[in-house]
Image: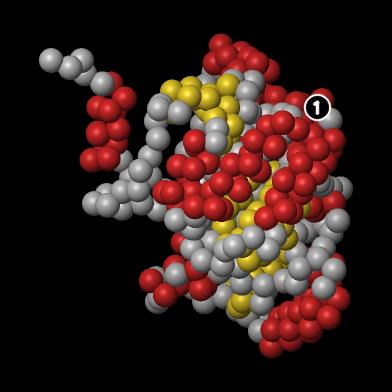
Amino acid sequence: MTAPDPAAELLAYDREHLWHPYTSMTAPTPVRLVRSAAGACLDVEGYGEVIDAMSSWWAAIHGYRVPDLDAAIARQTKQMSHVMFGGLTHAPAIELAQRLVEITPEGLEKVFLADSGSVSVEVAMKMALQFQLGAGRDDARRFLALHGGYHGDTFQPMSVTDPEGGMHAMWAGLLPHHVFAPRPPAPGDDAGLASWGDRVRDLADRNRTELAGIIVEPLLQGAGGMWPYDPRCLAVLREVADDLGLVLIFDEIATGFGRTGHLFVSELVTPDILCVGKALTGGYLTLAAVLTTDRIARGIAASEAGVLMHGPTFMGNPLACAVASASIDLVERRDWESDVERIGAGLSSGLEPLRGAAGVAGVRVLGAVGVVQLDHPVDVTRATEAALEAGVWLRPFRDLIYSMPPYLCAREDIETITGAIAKAVAVG
Ligand SMILES: *Cc1c(COP(=O)(O)O)cnc(C)c1O
């Protein structure tokens, strides 16, 4: 008789009953069992400690089991874990709002706490629409968005996500039709910038009566293709928004909290509405925030409804707010700029040699994000396995193998990560 294998039993149940992101219930791709996590590492059944090169999808910037963040949650559970936010308020939400207003650009001072990134995008779009209603622009119901963009998985965010990512075709008729500008040019592409700017101005102008706002991920497009673009594009968008009275929304759910080398890309060009999420709680709990200006808030109040028409059950969850404030404290206490610089330099020196290797179409590094684009779709199962064997957790998608490591990764950790990426590239 063999002893029961608890890990195997858990995985067998998972396979039969649990959906994972974008997976099939009848032909699931393999999942690995994580026993625990600490520092920059996950303890994965069958592999032991591996470095999490994904920071749990941009979120765990300080790594795992972070003493200050653990303590913040433990402290908050002694006060209250949750209370409704309708008609009630509490210090954790108020303190977080203060911290967010302080660390984001001047003018962004009104805060809506949402429960996930996608919901924050819903709220941001709703704010823009209500603002235009308040301004008497009842026909302004569409958004200008970018090819290659990604804004979440619920319906409105899907509608401003790249229409060629497959989603639009599938949901034809259900999704509102927005206006899509081309993918912005790479940094330093002067000719590309000029023609892109002309195209954006022209598209916005031709749709001016129907447009309510512009929504983009500033500087770096994430899940739509891991594409860093020229920062001068942001000034073009600001100018177009100002000229046509459109609300400019920056979705910094992935780029926020230092990842690109700016605490927020919005420091370069200030939007009217800013969405943050992912790393907001250091990856501990789901929480997002929408920040906007007094002008937009007044415009919303001037709409017929008079109020912002949104209010989720778990709005301003105290545990999430407390850990978010503790994470922001940590971001400020750690020298995040030199962390991002060190990681970026390590990713560059480790990944640049892959340029020109068989199957590699391009290498891109921005801030603490490193991307290798292949000339074919990645064999995710083989690439993931090769990386795990090399001591690293990677989660490639489409033709991309990439990493955004936790900020505490040392030089040697980044060497391990780029070594694993090279192995994944070789088999992927
Ligand atoms: C992840 C992401 C979202 C969606 O956030 P969820 O918390 O997964 O709903 C939206 N926009 C961007 C840019 C993202 O990276």
Residue lying at 61% horizontally and 72% vertically, measured from the top left: 147
Q: Is residue 310 visible?
A: no
SS category of the residue bearing label 1: loop
Residue lying at 63% horizontally and 23% vertically, measured from the top left: 39
Image: 417 above or below 293: above
Query: What amino acid is found at the position of numbered circle 1 in the picture?
Result: Arg
Q: Is residue 42 visible?
A: yes
Image coordinates of residue 145 in percent, x first then y, are: 64, 70
Colour scheme of this structure image? secondary structure
Query: Which residue is the site of mark 1?
Result: 334
* 328 lies left or right of 306: right
Examine the image and state in which quarter residue 112 appears. Answer: top right
Q: Residues within 10 Å of mark 1 (few under 14, many from 20)?
A: some
Image: 54 above or below 120: above
- The residue lying toward the viewer, choosing from 224 and 40, is 40
Residue lying at 43% horizontally and 23% vertically, measured from the top left: 35
Residue lying at 51% horizontally and 66% vertically, measured from the top left: 376
* 163 lies left or right of 357: left
